[in-house]
């Protein structure tokens, strides 16, 4: 059951990729992109509000050379 709540506005501060080396030599890149945030009427044990979010997993497969070029561009 999805808790009751209201959608609230948000803006991304950082959306970074996570990279994983695969046994076949390629690199798997994964990034979570949040598309909606709902502030529920619930609170956790410390009194903070509980949020529910909708997201999409963005996935890419890179060769070793493509990964090295991507990492170089990010520096």
Image (cartoon, helix red, strand yellow):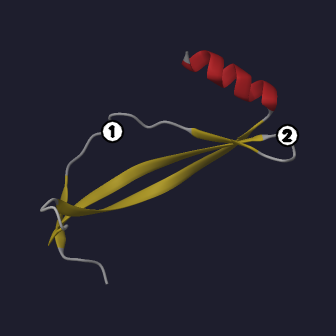
Q: CA distance from mark 1 to mark 2?
A: 32 Å
**Residue positioned 56% across, 20% down in the render:** 74
Kindly identify which residue carries mark 2: 25
The part of the image, by quadrant, that contains residue 25 is: top right
Pointer 1 or 2: first along the chain: 1
Quadrant in the picture for the C terminus: top right
Front residue (pair 49, 46): 46
**Residue positioned 75% across, 27% down in the render:** 66
Q: Position of residue 36 (x, y in %)?
A: 31, 57
Q: Position of residue 28 (x, y in %)?
A: 70, 44
10 Å neighbourhood of mark 1: few (<14), some, or many (≥20)?
few
Q: Position of residue 11 (x, y in %)?
A: 27, 40
Kindly identify which residue carries mark 1: 12
The part of the image, by quadrant, that contains residue 53 is: bottom left
Task: Tally the marks.
Answer: 2
Tell me the mark number nearer the camera, choosing from 1 and 2.
2
In the picture, measured across the screen, residue 13 lies left or right of residue 28, that is left
Front residue (pair 21, 38): 21
Q: In what element is the residue under mark 2?
A: loop
Quadrant in the picture for the N terminus: bottom left
10 Å neighbourhood of mark 2: few (<14), some, or many (≥20)?
few
**Residue positioned 84% across, 47% down in the render:** 23
């Amino acid at each position: 059951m999805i808790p009751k709540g209201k959608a609230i506005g948000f803006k991304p501060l950082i959306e970074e990729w996570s990279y994983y080396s695969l046994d076949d030599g390629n690199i798997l890149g994964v990034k979570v992109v949040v598309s909606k945030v709902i502030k529920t009427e619930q609170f956790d044990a410390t009194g903070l509000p509980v949020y529910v979010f909708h997201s999409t997993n963005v996935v890419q497969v890179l060769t070793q050379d493509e990964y090295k070029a991507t990492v170089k561009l990010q520096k």
